[in-house]
Image: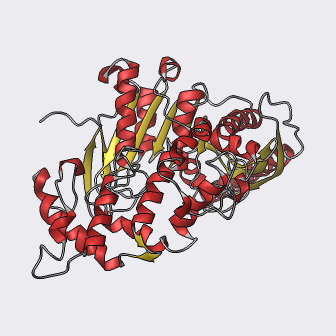
Amino acid sequence: MRVLMGLLVATLVTLFAGQAMAQADAQAQKCRQLAGVDFGDIVDAPSSILSATFKGSACEIDGYVQPNVGFALRLPAAWNGKFGEVGCGGFCGAVLPQLCDDMLARGYACLTSDLGHKSTGNDGKWAYNNLQAEIDFASRATHVLAVAGKAIAEHYYSKAPTRAYFLGCSTGGRQGFFQAQHFPDDFDGIVAGAPVSRITGVGMANTWATMAMLKDGKPLFKFDDMTVLHDAVLARCDAIDGHKDGVIDDPRKCTFDAGSLGCMARSTGACFNADQVAAIRKIYGGPVNSKGEKLFAGGQQPGSELDWRVFIATASSAAGVHGFMQDMFRYMMFTPDPGPLWSLKDFDWDKDPPRLALMESLYNAENPDMRKFKARGGKLIAYQGWSDPLILPENVIDFYGLTERTMGGPAATRDFFRLFMVPGMGHCGGGSGPFTVDYLAYLENWVEKGAAPDAVVAKSATAERTLQAYPLPAK
């Protein structure tokens, strides 16, 4: 009897293994056949498949949407019926399939892209007198990728995706905002982190902080200076939220003046000279013109000082933030482009901000009228780190308030749009407090089950905390 049972089990194992191999072979053949399909008839998004290979448990597709929007599309064998698109960062310029790893593991058909050009994340020369590339980067690419990705997935699976979601941070956050505002039919739900919603404002804010770190072309600060400043800010403001944990929950409640660390005010310990104190005040204050008029919402927040090192490290070089901002203004923000001889020190804080308006109209993702997105049931989750040195936190708060006024008040806005401010978090992640949140899971529950996220749980390796949706409930 045992022998018979053993033979039966062995036979079944062999049978199932054979079926699995046959299914894998069928999937591989089906995937390879995609390379021979002409997707040039996708309306508004004519596309070509450059390669299609079945690896592991997914069909890996590389292709482009005409004329130059490169993409990677991953189609899992165990599909959950949903389509996802993941945004890129900086200037984009490279297709990074690994950005789809999380969505692919959940069973999504997932697409990511170079946003219409080839470059590194910090290289802006692709935009030099190249309006088509700028249009793709600003708005077109994200939309046509959604159209093409869903069409290819439908061809492969013989049925259309039941849901579509977008996830992105930084430039990806801007992509998400733009989709909700201008292409409301593309996605059922959007997660937009640290959105570069007004790219010219972000450019001015980062240029302001970078140049404030210099005097006569030389850095005013060393890395350790930021530790001294940060420790002083925490000593004054860490406990204002009721507990000392190295994180300031709402930096707007912190009243700190750099003058308290001036060498004239301190008889012991590290201190800052008059030029350094003035620079710190400028960075907290944010960019202004010669009349003192604000050019962008807010400045660097108390508690973010350790992240200012990004400006110190790059203030006197052509790399990093300095190089990124310089390329942005050289090749993207003005009409005509000033080109490679222009440098950040050439920016005129009185004359140049108005000149940015034309190109800003192309890139801007701050249209608060999202009635169409809301009407079709779309849901939007945004998040922003309070210690983000690159995207000033008060800008997204300002936009959320504008949306409330446009959409009919707080309740009408919360029906489709939730904002989460993350204490201590830097740009898209990192920082002194828990910041990792499974925003996609919260978004799915909201879209598919109607469970609006009043709060989310942020985790780190050692702690977690609950983040309430903005605006925080009155205590």
| Residue depicted at x 36% and y 47% | 393
Q: Is residue 423 left or right of residue 215?
A: left
Eyeballing the image, is 418 above or below 352?
A: above
User: Which of 359/199 is in front?
Assistant: 359
Q: Residue at x 35, y 55 (%)?
A: 435
Is 163 drawn above or below residue 282 in the view shown? above
Can you give x and y, in whole percent of width and height, for residue 342 in the image? 63, 62
Image quadrant occupied by the N terminus? bottom right
Instruction: Compare residues 396 and 12 and report the one nearer the observer.
Output: 396
Would you identify the image quadrant in which residue 99 lies? bottom right
Residue 199 visible here: yes
Residue 263 place in picture, x, y as percent: 18, 77
Residue in the image at 74% along x and 31% along y = 158
- Residue 462: image location, x then y, percent: 27, 64
The answer to whether 231 is drawn above or below residue 399 in the figure is below
Q: Position of residue 466 (x, y in %)?
A: 25, 46
